[in-house]
Amino acid sequence: PPPSGFFSALELLIASSVFCLIFMAIRSYRQQMHKGLKRPPGPWSYPLIGNMLGRNPHLSLTRMSHKYGDMMQIHIGTKPVLVLSGLNTIKQALVKQGEDFMGRPDLYSFRNIGDGQSLTFSTESGEMWQICRKLVQNALKTFSVSPSPNSSSICLLEEHISKEADYLVKKFQQLMEEKKSFDPYRYVVVSVTNVICAMCFGKRYSHDDQELISIVSLLDGLEDIAASGNPADFIPILQYLPSHSMKKLKEFNDRFLAFLQRSVKEHYKSFYKTSLIQQSQEKRLEPNANIPEEKILNLVNDLVGAGFDTVTTALSWCLMYLLTYPEVQKRIHEEIDENIGRERKPRMSDRIRLPYTEAFIVEMFRHSSFLPFTIPHCTTKDTVLKGYYIPKGLCVFVNQRQVNHDEKLWKDPFIFSPERFLTADRMKINRAETEKVLVFGMGKQRCIGEAIARWEVFLFLTTLLQQLEFSGRAGEKVDMTPQYGLIMKHKRCEHFQVKQHFHMERK
Ligand code: HEM
């Protein structure tokens, strides 16, 4: 007789095949339902594990969407996820059917961000959430347009950015003299954090502030947390395994929150006067808009959290593209020389006069697509999108990077070419083209800080380039490979060198 081990292996095989068949039958039965409407198509997935997304979900999900289309249902673990691609489909969902798609899923990593009370990552989308969002929007607007007490700058935002960018110019020159090459990231991150902190509670930190540096560097290597497709968000058992990243995220949260708490307390008076509460009174919002102090801390946490890593990454990608495409840097230099010259500092109002520089920034956003997906969404009710049935509570990934590299929208999408955003005479920005780029999301949860982020990138970049020329150390390769995450970063590059573009005479 065959050895008993043989039977048990066969039995196991039969049992697992039967299990798979039942699983697939149930799934396919569940897909053919609801008034004849079907669930969106999608690839076959393993029971319990779901689809394998690999190390680069932005690439694997885009490949899959070529086969299954703009609305695709995948599984991560046992949980279904709707993946949206294609500009029109995304617009239909997030704008035209915005109410239906404005939820946030209850994900494990979201619960670990900002005490679980974050405006951005919470599942709340009720009245309080809407009031908070409106307050933050108004406060940001006020910060950015309030006239500066210092008459040389038109507004506080311009003044803060200009001061920080000037500091960076000096710091880079000093590093060059002392070390012959350097990694700009560590300095850019403090400057960008300073801009948002100055707006929230009027405080600037030193570039040698060990506390701030050690807090922001805790984020290194945490890119995949809160990114679309983090396995621990979908396969609960993984949450109980020891995770170095989650431990680091918790440490970051605790220290960041304590740091902000102290800063808000120290500056509560000025913050109080200039921002959220005053906004709420001016706008005569309902009495329940009286936001408690803890909530303000959460809002500040959201703003600083959303505002420093994103803008730092954007600037850092700009510098990498300048290194890789010296001819592009030369054209930006020429544009700055011709339109601003050396007698005065760049201003926010110069943006309209520098279409090539603007096109460079938009092309950096498109080509890098460093936020490949928005923050995950979730449906708030049963709905129908493009003829497919979408149930309430379904987690939704929005593939921004696919839109930015869609062959149907772009000629040679993988080529870096700022020119694609200029009009035929190259004198102006072609708005119809820039509007196709998707980096800040769209609809009800679109980024609140978009305007500020665009101003920051523009003013930091022009102030740096007015005075400096960037290059890489001879013989060193620039590695532009992005590392997957909510915010995709390049590997740190220590080979940056600068020389004086020309000396600016300070007034
Ligand atoms: C280049 C820089 C930035 C990029 C690319 C960016 C992109 C995004 C994206 C894609 C979202 C999610 C949209 C969605 O889920 O549909 C978002 C949300 C958000 N962003 Fe930004 N962002 C940037 C800078 C900023 C800045 C500077 C601030 C604050 C001053 C900010 C504040 C926020 C907030 C509060 C949300 C959450 C909105 C909500 O859930 O309702 N962002 N951002």
Image: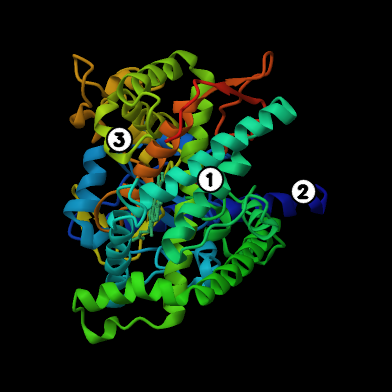
Dot 1, how many residues are within 10 Å of its Cα: few (below 14), some (14-19), or many (20+)? many
Which residue sits furthest front?
A: 507
Identify which amino acid the numbered label 2 is placed on: Phe
Colour scheme of the picture: rainbow
Mark nearer the viewer, 1 or 2: 1
Q: Is residue 168 above or below residue 10?
A: above
Q: Answer with the quarter of the image where residue 361 lies.
A: top left
Nearer to the camera, 380 or 357: 357
Q: Quadrant of the C terminus?
A: top left
- Say which residue label 2 marks: 6
Between discs 3 and 2, the one toward the N terminus: 2
Q: Nearer the viewer, mark 3 or mark 1?
A: 3
In the foreground, 178 or 45 = 178
**Residue 463 as seen in the image, left or right of residue 362:** right
CA gap, disc 3 to disc 2?
A: 58 Å
- The percent coordinates of residue 144 (x first, y second) are 32, 54
Identify which residue is drawn at 40% across, 67% down. 119
Name the residue rendered at 35%, 49% in the picture.
Answer: 452
- Identify the residue shown where x is 45% and y is 56%: 196
Disc 1: which residue? 485
Q: List x then y, in percent, for residue 137.
A: 29, 62
Q: Earlier in the sequence, mark 1 or mark 2?
A: 2
Q: Position of residue 369 (x, y in %)?
A: 42, 36
Secondary-structure class at tag 2 = helix
User: Which residue, as the protein is rendered here, is positioned at the far bottom?
Assistant: 287
Work out whether 152 lies above or below 282. Answer: above
What is the CA distance from the residue labelled 1 to the residue labelled 2?
Answer: 45 Å
Q: Which residue is mark 3?
A: 437
Badge 3: few (under 14), some or many (20 or more) residues near its Cα, within 10 Å? many
Relative depth, front residue between 166 and 477: 166
